[in-house]
Amino acid sequence: MTDITAADLERLTEWDTPTICNGLEVTNPERRALGFTTGVMFCAFPELKPICGYARTATIRAMVAPKRTGAENVASRQAYYEYVAKGGPAPSISVIQDLDSEPGFGAFWGEVNTSIHKGLGALGVITDGSIRDLDASAPGFQLLARKVGPSHAHVHVVDHGGQVNIFGMVVNDGDIVHADRHGAVVIPPEAVKKLPDAIDLLTRREAVILDAARAPDFSFDKLKAAMGQSADIH
């Protein structure tokens, strides 16, 4: 992974997450049915461009207060923030699993945490918990969540740096994640530099079919011909 640059990840934000998933079907066909979110997620800012970065993982709870002293709770929160800031390469994306029986009971994400995380180099968050303060969130910071809620209740970090599962997408610390208003997907490191060429191939193949389908004289026979021409593109 050491030869992957921030520019490589930035280039992948030229495409939406469904297109990245399409590309992965070419570069990593064994992952066709895994590695992406499968639940309906709320995107706070669908107008923002896609994000792509290294996962900083954590788990939270909000329904019950932590069984720690105040000082221990502060130390735990600070350890998490240090992990976000120094836990690996940049840019980062926070990926946080809510362990409560009712995920999203209390929101970890709002005006303060979006500002802190953006300041520490994070591009956004992917969580199966809730978010709030949408009108006061840090500008340009993306939020993908289960739902929107008003309160943070007893929200606290349980642990950080371990494996999490967000709507079927299993993520480990340091995984490369791509996300937009459609959801998120984990990108294997070996696919990062291959994806632009794979997407170019798929785009050229699709263009033949789309051009035919959008033509005023489109017919089933023209569709068959276009599909044949598309398959011949390599």
Image (cartoon, rainbow, N blue to C red):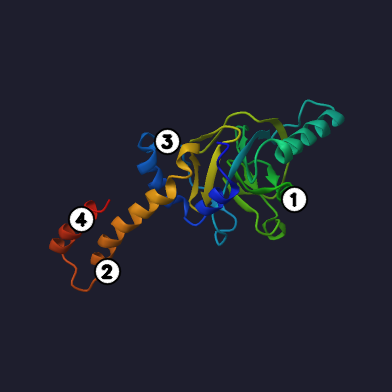
Is tag 4's residue or tag 2's residue first in the polypeptide sequence? 2
Residue carrying label 2 = 214
Q: Tell which residue pokes out farthest to the front in this image.
A: 3
Is tag 4's residue or tag 3's residue first in the polypeptide sequence? 3
Q: CA distance from mark 1 to mark 3?
A: 32 Å
Residue carrying label 3 = 34
Is tag 1's residue or tag 2's residue first in the polypeptide sequence? 1
Q: Are marks 2 and 3 in contact (CB under 8 Å)?
A: no
The quadrant holding residue 226 is bottom left
Kindly identify the residue that appears in the image at 70 percent across and 56 percent down: 137
Q: Tell which residue pokes out farthest to the right in this image.
A: 71
Label 3 residue SS = loop
Q: Is residue 97 above or below residue 41?
A: above
For the residue marked with disc 2, what is the amino acid?
Answer: Arg
Label 4 residue SS = helix
Circle 3 Cα neighbour tier, 10 Å, few/some/many (<14 / 14–19 / ≥20): few
Q: Position of residue 101 (x, y in %)?
A: 60, 32
Circle 4 Cα neighbour tier, 10 Å, few/some/many (<14 / 14–19 / ≥20): some
* In this rendering, the label closer to the viewer, 4 or 3: 4
Q: CA distance from mark 4 to mark 3?
A: 27 Å
Kindly identify the residue that appears in the image at 47 percent across and 54 percent down: 16
Q: Quadrant of the N terminus?
A: top right
Kindly identify the residue that appears in the image at 28 percent across and 63 percent down: 210
Q: Can the viewer see residue 38?
A: no
For the residue marked with disc 3, what is the amino acid?
Answer: Leu
Residue carrying label 1 = 119
Relative placement, left or right, of 10 versus 62 is left
Relative placement, left or right, of 48 versus 234 is right
Kindly identify the residue that appears in the image at 24 percent across and 55 percent down: 230
Q: Can the viewer see residue 137?
A: yes
Q: CA distance from mark 1 to mark 2?
A: 46 Å
